[in-house]
Image (cartoon, grey):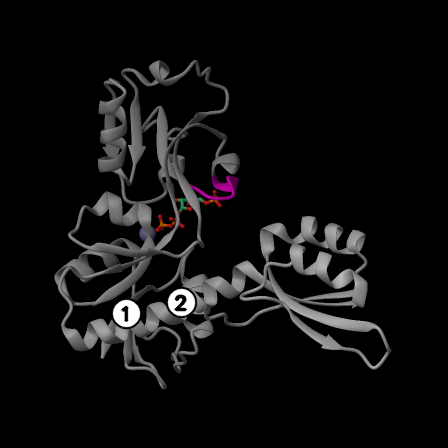
Amino acid sequence: MLRIALQKSGRLSEASLKLIKECGISFTNGTGKLKTIADNFPAEFLFLRDDDIPRYVADGVADIGIVGENVVVEDRSEVVITKALGFSKCRLSIAIPRSEMYEGIESLQGKHIATSYPNILRDFLNKNGIDATIHEISGSVEIAPSIGLADAVCDIVSTGSTLMSNGLKEVEVIFRSQAVLIQTPVLNEEKQAILQKLLFRIEAVQNARNNKYILLNAPKEAIPAIIDILPGMKSPTVLPLAMEGWYSLHSVIQEDQFWEIIEQLKAAGAEGILVVPIEKMIY
Ligand code: PRP
Ligand code: ZN
């Protein structure tokens, strides 16, 4: 059985659970439970504070975990980052009171900065030759300037609303982060095989998110031009319609090419274009 650590509650928890669900893994989680076994996959889930996840995975208490890259890099635990998951994107930034002037990094010289990320911040300050004092605090970093504890903060920014409501402005982005899957350095063969199974499913889910299924109708003479536009997994499916001389073409297009391709298809003579989400996609 593979032990998987997930965040109990916070920025990552909802998206992590959604990914697990889309991988076809279900469990009955009595709310507030710290541990649960999957109904249909050889896995056990541990629900932990995100900050603790790298350590549990490094120690082998959990085999793998889903956590913010920011937490992994700050923690310096010996874990392997297996895969970037593309959700819960955020940045670690330095922010100062809105009323303060900022003229570049030099403005931080001699300042007091409150943070829960002393390691990443120290590296950044050293690299830039800034001599500032780091105050390590474990939470509610954003109030430090208003209570006179620090001149600046270094904290996670996602929408920016926390900074805004505390009268702070973001002046330096020092690290960009997203959710990652981490694993313990040594996994036995059996667990490795379960992990491969899970990674295969995660990839199918990620591919599906980046692609759409497209169906369209076209007259026979337009088909060659349309095939040139549609990449497809191999080549598009072409099916005759009941109406003489007309065909239905099916293919897969990438989300980011979507609007451009639709324009080209219309120009080439496509009609009745349908674009539908894909649930899973395996190459
Ligand atoms: C971070 C940070 C802020 C908030 C910023 O906390 O400490 O409180 O997110 O988000 P916003 O820009 O959307 O307002 P996080 O979710 O990482 O929680 P944690 O520090 O308790 O783990
Ligand atoms: Zn946390």
In the picture, the disc for residue 202 is 2
In the picture, the disc for residue 4 is 1
Nearer to us in this view, 184 or 221: 221
Residue occupying image coordinates x 48% and y 41%: 162
In the picture, the disc for residue 254 is none
- Identify the secondary structure beneath mark 2: helix
Residue occupying image coordinates x 26% and y 49%: 72
Which is closer to the viewer, label 2 or label 1?
A: 2
Residue 19 place in picture, x, y as percent: 44, 67
Name the image quarter holding residue 193. Answer: bottom left
Relative to 278, is 271 on the left or the right? right
Other residues around mark 1 within 10 Å, as few (<14) / some (14–19) / many (≥20)? many
Residue 78 drawn in magenta: no
Image quadrant holding the N terminus, namely: bottom left
Nearer to us in this view, 39 or 151: 39
Answer yes or no: is residue 83 visible: yes
Report, in whole angstroms, how far the alpha carbon at label 2 lies from the one at label 1.
Answer: 14 Å
Residue occupying image coordinates x 34% and y 72%: 198
The disc, 2 or 1, on the residue closer to the chain's N-terminal end is 1
Name the image quarter holding residue 181. Answer: bottom left
Q: Label 2 amino acid? A: Ile
- Position of residue 20 relative to residue 224, above or below, is below
* Dot 2 beta carbon under 8 Å from ligand 1: no
Read off the magenta span: 157-162
